[in-house]
Image (tube, rainbow, N blue to C red):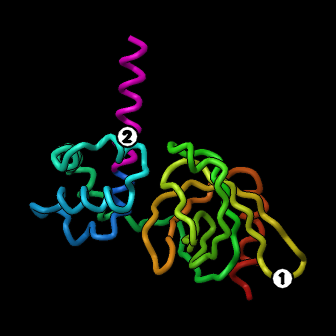
Amino acid sequence: MISSMINHEQAVRDNLQMLKLHLGWPDRDKHMGRPDEGLFFYDWLQRERAQAAVVQKIRRVEDVVAFIVANRVVLGRSVEVRNARRESRHETNLQVLVNVSEASDADFVGLSSRCITIDLGLHGMRVRSEKRLPEDGKFRLTVAPVGFPITIYDLVGDPRWVTNDEGGYQMGIQIAELDDWERWQAEFDTRFLRR
């Protein structure tokens, strides 16, 4: 009984991870719903995400096709809500230190990367990184905006997607309402919008 519950929980985690990978697939819109979707998604997974634990479990293209068929309703709806956000984003160029505190792939835990923000909102940010970071888990974020007084925000973030970018990666991070959140929220407009 316990082992079947553990196996079920792992299957749910694997399916969720595959959904996140599909959402982060750069050619998703190009192949979505086409007969070659499974083949091209499989190829991308093997080239770009082979180190992910869930991808290492995939043996054949048919495994990916079965995943797509089983999740067609969810994948189809996600196109409509993919860019839904709580508030608008603002273009920025801030340094953020990202430290991986949790990830399904243990090799990522403890990895740090100095990132540059592309855009920023109260609840999220898009960053550019030279290092590939995981698409799941938890991040510790250290944000130190330029200006006086010197201020450092220690935040918690959840990775939402990762994609290849020129010479590195872009990543979407949702900011959790933990740690320095209250101060971040209170000072956000003053520190980041009124310049």
Q: In this view, does 160 lie above or below 165?
A: above
Identify the amino acid type marked 2.
Answer: Asp
Seen at 85% across and 70% down, the residue is 151
Q: Residue furthest left?
A: 35
For disc 2, the neighbor class at 10 Å (few under 14, some 14 to 19, many from 20) is: some
User: In the depicted view, which residue is nearer to us: 4 or 71?
Assistant: 4
Identify the amino acid type marked 1.
Answer: Gly
Q: Is residue 135 above or below residue 88?
A: above
Q: Which residue lies furthest to the right in this view?
A: 149
Residue 62: where, in percent of width, then height?
A: 15, 46
Q: Which mark is residue 174?
A: none
**What secondary structure prevails in the magenta region?**
helix
User: In the depicted view, which residue is nearer to us: 194 or 97?
Assistant: 97
For disc 1, the neighbor class at 10 Å (few under 14, some 14 to 19, many from 20) is: few
Image quadrant holding the N terminus, namely top left
Q: Give the range drawn in magenta.
A: 1-18
State the image quarter where residue 143 is shown. bottom right
Q: Is residue 138 above or below residue 76?
A: above
Image quadrant holding the C terminus, namely bottom right
Residue 157: where, in percent of width, then height?
A: 62, 56
Seen at 48% across and 55% down, the residue is 135
Q: How far apart are marks 2 and 1 (CA)?
A: 43 Å
Q: Name the residue under label 2.
A: 14
Seen at 27% across and 57% down, the residue is 77
Seen at 55% across and 62% down, the residue is 173
Q: Name the residue under label 1.
A: 147
Would residue 73 be counted in the magenta stretch? Answer: no
State the image quarter where residue 156 is shown. bottom right
Q: What element carries label 1?
A: loop
